[in-house]
Image (tube, rainbow, N blue to C red):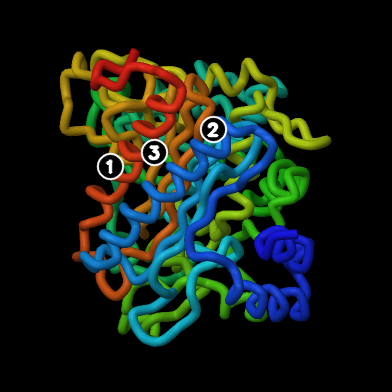
Amino acid sequence: MTASRLLRRVIGRAGTLAGIVAAAMLSACASTFHARTGPDDGRNQLAAELRDSVAKVLKAARKDKAFPGAYVVVGDSRGVLAEGSVGRLDWRRSPRPTEHTLWDLASLTKVIGTTSAMAQLAERGLIDVDSGVQKYLPDWTGPGQEAVTVRHLLTHRSGLPSFKPYDTLTHNADSLAQLLYHTPLDRAPGERMVYSDIGAMVMGALVERMSGERLDQYLAGHVFAPLAMYETMFRPADFVRDRVAPTELDTLRGGLVPGQVHDERAYYLGGIAAHAGLFSSAFDLERFARMMLRGGALDSARIFAPETIARFTQFEDSMTHNRALGWQKPIRASMADKALGSPWAGRFMSDQAYGHTGFTGTSIAIDPTLDLYIILLSNRVNPTRANTKISGVRNRLADAVVTAVRRQRGLTINVDRP
């Protein structure tokens, strides 16, 4: 049994102190970068090449001080092909990242969490994405808001601004929530795509209203627990905080404080928000990605119908913006605004790919055409968000991985995304 497999067995449901201590001890004997091998020689060859490609990109990024530490997992619908870490959890002497390190996902909360909830509610018929938001939130009112649909929220075309620094006005959670909820539109719905944290917050309110549960409780009961994602949570408990990668030095909050959400508005909302606040591990996100590649099911858990995944991950308007329902899509040469960016995708993923990034240095890319996922977890905002080198790292990682996969499978490598 490999050290990694023994780690998984020891940590179990990732809740006991003994399991955490044992996992930390075992992690010292695991390779920094390794490939998953089995009876399939072709798969083993690809895994070895991916291991070397990932190692090269991560080591160069750490040398360039793109982040204190990072963990990458690359795999397909059958499981992990290669994974590994570089650096440490902090620039000071600290533990190395492992597959059970908890990372602040930042805006990956929008897709792993909020979009998943919206997709399930739509699948159950509790939400119609083409209905007006006021059908479900009649108290969400303001000029022009009667024309905003759920689809507008999911594609960031609601007319809501990107964000408002209301956290500089109040630190009271209820007051902040009211200010965010009642933010007026600053343009006509559907006019253009403007990535909006506030729109995601409105979706969180919609999920809670239509499910009758608080957002974190809904996700735990309907997504994370069924998938055995026991390391995915809002507001990590004190006893797991030694496994959390610290983020930015924030003098207002006492310095580098692991386990508290980096995003200021999510923090002052109490740590549970629809746009940011989730913490998770490579171990858990690998299960989520594999579930998506398997058409919404993993082991005995059915999270989505295959049609729901297809519906929520297709281009909404590939000529003008790079959004699906909640998810982001690769940039196409035909798009009117090529500056939208999709650093998680690189140049060679297919048009069927979808993914997202997180401000703290996280990203996920899933390509069903290639049967491939790439998960990058880092704390690039440590010690400051001024470090923006992560975008180049994401692109180089995606290109290296997809190049290896396409070459091993005898597929064309070009920038046209067939």
SS for tag 3? helix
Q: Label 1 amino acid?
A: Asn
Query: Which of the pair 43/378 is nearer the observer?
Result: 43
Q: CA distance from mark 1 to mark 3?
A: 10 Å
Question: Which of the 4 quarters of the picture holds residue 296?
Answer: top right
Give the x, y percent position of residue 226. 77, 44
SS for tag 2? loop
SS for tag 1? helix
Give the x, y percent position of residue 258. 48, 76
Report if residue 201 is visible in the image.
no
Q: Residues within 10 Å of mark 3 (few under 14, many from 20)?
A: many
Dot 2 or dot 1: first in sequence order is 2
Query: Which of the pair 86/34 is nearer the observer?
Result: 34
Q: Residue drawn at (40%, 50%), measured in percent from left and top?
A: 52
Give the x, y percent position of residue 53. 37, 47
Q: CA distance from mark 3 to mark 2?
A: 47 Å
Q: Residue drawn at (38%, 26%), measured in percent from left and top?
A: 407
Dot 3 or dot 2: first in sequence order is 2
Query: Which of the pair 87/315 is nearer the observer?
Result: 87
Question: Which of the 4 quarters of the picture holds residue 232?
Answer: bottom right
Q: Residue drawn at (31%, 36%), measured in percent from left and top?
A: 399
Q: Label 3 amino acid?
A: Val
What residue sits right under mark 1 in the picture? Answer: 395
What residue sits right under mark 2 in the picture? Answer: 138
Q: Label 2 amino acid?
A: Pro
| Relative height, residue 266 to residue 370 (above, below) | below
What residue sits right under mark 3 in the picture? Answer: 401
